[in-house]
Image (spheres, rainbow, N blue to C red):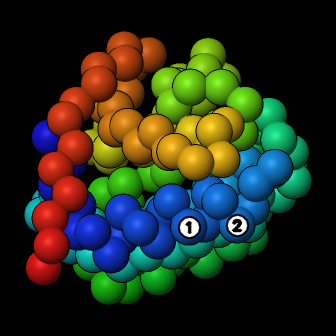
Amino acid sequence: MLRISRDLHDAIVAHARRDHPDEACGVVAGAEGSDAPTRFVPMLNAARSPTFYEFDSTDLLALYKEMDANDEEPVVVYHSHTATEAYPSRTDISYASEPNAHYVLVSTREPDSTEFRSFRIVDGAVTEEAVEVVDV
């Protein structure tokens, strides 16, 4: 189960809405081994595409160096789908390289509602998990 604060949930949704019609992407870092997302890091979609996202390689390298220096890891890796449901595509599955991360997808296809779903993706296997949004 992904347990995430309302502030982080809302920040992810706001980023997805702000970047629409392009896909948004980012990371929520947390202390190594904690499974607790704490630090919101919106990233640039280098592809600038409504159907694909790609982290800028320079930004991603800098983020991993920063997380390493802070004893953090990517707890949540998120991106949005602008015209389809919040479910990992074949491309999303093939790019999932963090076996301990929660992969959050947000669908912005409906202007008045938002799908926010979380998945574990390990060795190509996708498992949806419950999301608990908590007020802290």
Residue nearest the viewer, comparing 111 with 40: 111
- Where is residue 14? Give x, y as percent: 56, 67
Q: Is residue 10 visible?
A: yes
- Identify the residue at horizontal 63%, vertical 39% (top origin): 110
Left/right placement of residue 119 relative to residue 52 reads left
Quarter of the rendering containing residue 42: bottom right
Left/right placement of residue 2 relative to residue 69 reads left
Quarter of the rendering containing residue 38: bottom left
Secondary structure of the residue carrying tag 2 is helix
Find the distance from the CA under tag 2 to the CA under tag 1: 6 Å
User: Residue 14 got which mark?
Assistant: 1
Amino acid type, label 2: Arg
- Identify the residue at horizontal 38%, vertical 37% (top origin): 117
Task: Classify 38 as above or below 53.
Answer: below
Task: Classify 52 as above or below 76.
Answer: above
Task: Classify 1 as above or below 88.
Answer: below
Residue matched to label 2: 18
Residue contact at pointers 2 and 1, CB within 8 angstroms: yes
Q: Residue furthest right?
A: 48
